[in-house]
Amino acid sequence: MKDSEDLPLNRSDIDTIWETFTASRFPSLHVFPSCGPLKMTPEACQRVDEELKAMQMVLCAARTRRNAVVAAISRLPPEVLSNIFFEAQSDSPRKRDHLGWINVSHVCRQWRAVALTNKTLWLELPLALGKKWIRESLLRAPSHPRPSLVYSDRDVGPIHTKYVDAIHQHLGHARHLHVVAHVGFPRVHHAKLLDLCYGLTFPVPYLETLAIKAPGIRDYALPFPLNTFGRIAPRLRSITTYNVSDFPWKPRFITNLVHLDIAIGKDAMARSSSKPSLRNIVKFLRKSPTLQYLSLVRCIPRSSTEEVARLPNLAALILGGSTTDCLRLVKCLRIPRTTKVHLRLRYRHDRDVSSLTTSISNIFTCLTAHLTPPSASSSLRIDLRCDDQPDAEEDLHIDISHVEDGASSRRPSVSLSFNTGSSHPRRLDIWRVVIKNLPVELGKLKELSVVGVETAGDAECLAWHWTDIAEQLNEVRQVHAEHDFGRALCQALSLFRDTSKGTGWQYRQSKPKQHVEAHAMILPRASRIEFGGVDLTDAVVIGVEEEAVDSEDSAANSAGEESNDNDRVYRLNLRLLLSWGVRARVLAFDASREMVSDPQPSLRIDGLDL
Amino acid sequence: MPTIVSVDDSTVPGEGSSRLLLLVSSDNKHIVVEEDIMSRSRFISKQVEGFEATSQRHAILLPFSSFVLNKVIEYCSHYRGYYLLEDDPDAAPPGRSPVREWDQEFLDVDRNMLLRIIKAAHYLEIKSLVGSCARAIADMIRGKTTEEMREILGVENDFTPEEEHSPSSKCTG
């Protein structure tokens, strides 16, 4: 019949099929040629049409049979197919021009039958697809509470009245409401968002999760209405808002929350409605002892209170705002020792550094319970991180969490992160202030993580500060360094200077030549060093490929350097070599700053046979 | 219903307290597996309960090949002793199947094999495996057009023109 499977039927094929197979089914057409004018009675025409329709049905039936026999997926039981559709529904695109998971109902008759008869697939109202599909969805599962009402401008574009109406209409039988407006809108769309928020006055007996996020808002925050949810929201357990002000802190109908995350954006904060009193917030929290996650960013009022809220189930506490405001709230909370605490504090580095001292000291005093090791065997770990993010909204981040320490015990882990900008002249002052003001438990510090303390030009100065605080860090047994290859490594290594032998790590800059070892901090108990996640304790040779140097300097540093073909210099810490013992491993850092680990020794140094 | 044939006790290793099962695949391969491994399968568990009631040991004939059966056994062996919510008959039915990294690697097989595994898992009533397979298949079709879905899974469009133009296919808002 066909010359090739890829070619369509040609004219002679069609004629052959007509003569041998089809003609007998169309007696009315039999006497006429395959082309040319036809003169037929209406009855004959109708018969032809009916026959064509029947053949079409035959074709469809044959395809159905073919699917049942050939397509493996069609042989799956309906409940399994339904399961697949259910999985396909998650993360399915919700766009105006894309039916998303509903496309499965257009693949074949079997898939459609399965999709249409499974009510659970139709519980999410497809807001983006408009009224017809919402109606279709309601038709499929008329009596079920809707699990989700989801609107995201990234999927369906700026919010439209029909979305607002649909949300208001169906919120009363929804379990989850998610509204996200990412991008900044013209005022007309902002008005729609306002309509949406003002309309949240219906009782929501089924609502469990509420998330309204409008990071795109640039002028003023969205409001909660006065009569939020008609004061009926018995199942509400999770609230997440961003740029929505006037949270109803007072009403009694919101109790037993598990998740509360309220944040006001940097730009929207200025015009947001008046903040509640701290007393109201603490009272509200007292009514939610079930809280496991509490995040309040830029919405903590400036007032103070003596009220106390106990949150025995709290797993994570995130507070953002001014140091003083956060501090006031921290004082009002009683939280478990194991709570992970993240403080995002605003502290402008152009202020007097000394004012930071009091704040840091107060914060650590408030969090003493978290910093005190739960058992004698535990130890603190401090990460000193210096981020360089000029656009960051907060300058000081404090993270307190607990890390697994062996089989059963957990130890506190404190991370301090500053955003000081790369050129800030007082950065080292801040470091010194912070480290000097860490609590007494710092004496038990056994791990020090130096993350991103890359201080071009400050090496000598930094070393001086290390020396200044060395007394507090003399229990450190492990050092982690990462983020910046090169100088940060040099500084990390300098912590291990063996003072009794005199010669240590030599750090070199173009001008003037500096010797960090003269000021390096003494960590006599340190026995392990880790860099970039790699344990260097047993390393034999550590080479840092630096910029090429002139011959004079090379000669001056010949004791600790070896040039390669590219006239680059490996700076080798012989003291480390000697003190850590000779093992067969070479670690080097190439010019692209990617660490190369070679199990075979590849360098020779005078006097040392590797 | 599965075909269960009585077998001579001597042919079944692990008689008595050793608790071994003899599974026979459709290609007549005999596979001995510890009962404990297959306890995740509610179908097998029910069969074993039947054995205990009648005090007779049987081989369990299964309607899929040894290749597929071995894959299922590999899955059950990996999760031996693990609690998976989906397989707990007393737990409330979970929502969508959780993403398990090992499962994703385990199910990185061709389409036909994946369909065979899900069918076998459904037969053996291993809900966690059914869920993971369903998720893997769903990943293939998510975000695709109907034509692409048909092509991926080898399905023909068998709608009549009227069906194609039915309301549920033409609602575009």
Image (cartoon, helix red, strand yellow):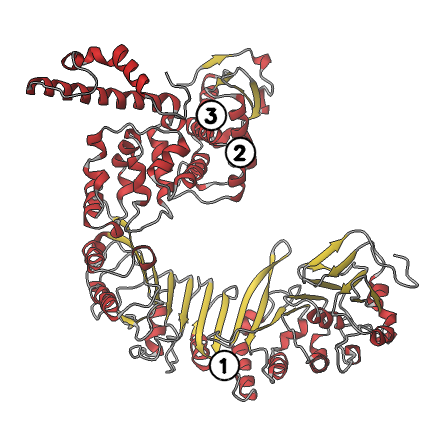
For the residue pair A501 and B40, the one nearer the viewer reads as: A501
Is the N terminus of chain A in the top left, top right, bottom left or bottom right quadrant?
top left
Is the C terminus of chain A in the top left, top right, bottom left or bottom right quadrant?
bottom right
x and y percentages locating residue A6 in the rendered image: 41, 26
Q: Which numbered dot is residue A469?
A: none
Q: Is residue A478 left or right of residue A195?
A: right
**Camera-nearest label, 3 or 2:** 2
| Of pointers 3 and 2, the one earlier in the residue sequence | 3
Q: Which numbered dot is residue B44?
A: 3
x and y percentages locating residue B19 in the rendered image: 56, 24
Give the amino acid type for the residue marked by disc 3 in the picture: Ile
Give the amino acid type for the residue marked by disc 1 in the picture: Tyr
Does dot 1 land on a helix, a strand or a loop? loop
x and y percentages locating residue A238 in the rendered image: 35, 60
Q: Which residue is mark 2?
A: B75
Crowdedness near tag 2: few (<14), some (14–19) or many (≥20) residues, C-alpha within 10 Å: some
Q: Are marks 2 and 1 in contact (CB under 8 Å)?
A: no
Q: Which residue is mark 1?
A: A347
Residue drawn at x 29%, y 36% as measured from the top left: A105
Does dot 2 land on a helix, a strand or a loop? helix
CA separation, marks 2 and 1?
53 Å
Give the amino acid type for the residue marked by disc 2 in the picture: Tyr
Residue B72 in view: yes
